[in-house]
Amino acid sequence: MMVAETKMKAVVAAGEGGPEVLEMADVPLGWPRGPHDVLVRLKAAGLNPVDIHLCRSGPLIEGDQPFVLGSDGAGIVEAVGDKVRAILPGEEVAFCYGGIGGDPGTYAEFAVVPAHSLAKKPESVSFAEAAAAPLVTITGWEALYQRAQLAADEHCLIHGGAGGTGHVAIQLAKLRGAKVAATVGDNDKAAFVAGLGADYTINYRSDDVAAAALAWTSGRGIDVALDNVGGDVMRSTFHAMAPFGRIVGLTGMTGDNENDDAFKRNVTVHNVMMLMAMWIGDTAHAAQQGGVVNQAMGLMADGKLRLHVAETYPLEEAAAAQQRLEQGGMTGKIVLEMD
């Protein structure tokens, strides 16, 4: 059906800064658009640390539209382009698209999304859970499966295991048959990650993480590590790696440590920045990422993947939600919900 509105409510970044620059506004709806696009009435939007970074530094894609944050969304299909066949109005969907400049993100009432980025949401999965899943699942999938080629029975270390990316990565690693250790900040988080399948927990506040990881592997070292902290954490992880181990970093590269552990152990380091496909307009890779979201929805429906939603906020309280995310220490994800 055709939608009469030419404007929608959205939370825009009125400038560069913290949550205080976020405000409600009327922005262009942007529909109808291309023949392969889909209009989604949003029911929920997931928050991610990249939202904080872009709010403070500005959009990756410059444009003349108001900057609406948020890449993760879930909702109900309102209308489809002329050439869309696999998605129908009324269907419930989830996706990762927008929120980096250019097309408005998901801190909004509606989103216009290419059909190839959409996955159908199972009835058993809530909108909040579905909106929490896409970006972190794509990140974990690309990091562990595609870059590190994690194999069954390998030892895998997940930093920040209770966080948004970490708690999903633990489950993906276990689905691959790996042995998983996770770093956490307290006993509650240790219990949480153990409930997700982690075989071993390390308190990064009180333990020497590298020494604990080496002890866990009887001195051999870690085969695959997922580092979402960078800097000194990555450098210390080099010391915990097995020969020919693989580290995947989510925050950029760092130099070797003072012992040249990365060099001596023949460690390879990979970068994952999953928003790159959208940033450079690589539609083929974006379609692959849409396929990952579709597989994630299936795993969630089967009870094999769980997205922990820690807190929800209404759309108009997006600034408070982002402030909470900035405080850190989250277990799982924060989600915005729309009436």
Image (tube, rainbow, N blue to C red):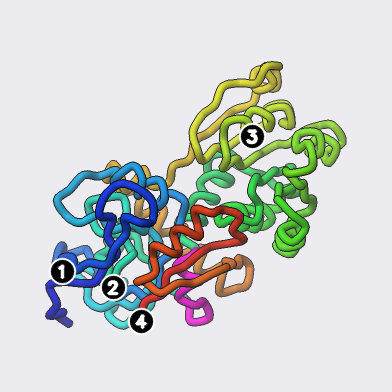
- Kind of residue indicated by mark 2: Glu
- Kind of residue indicated by mark 4: Asp
Residue 93 in sight here = no
Mark before the other along the chain sequence, 3 or 1: 1
- Alpha carbons under labels 4 and 3: distance apart: 41 Å
Residue linked to disc 2:
109
Q: Identify the secondary structure beneath mark 3.
A: helix
Residue sitting at x 29%, y 63%: 23
Q: Quadrant of the C terminus?
A: bottom left
- Kind of residue indicated by mark 1: Trp
Residue sitting at x 27%, y 71%: 110
Residue linked to disc 4:
339
Q: Residue furthest front?
A: 20
Residues packed near mark 4 inside 10 Å, few (<14), some (14 to 19) or many (20 plus): few
Q: Nearer the viewer, mark 3 or mark 1?
A: 3
Q: Magenta stretch: give its range.
A: 122-132
- Alpha carbons under labels 1 and 4: distance apart: 20 Å
Which of the 4 image quadrants contains residue 80? bottom left
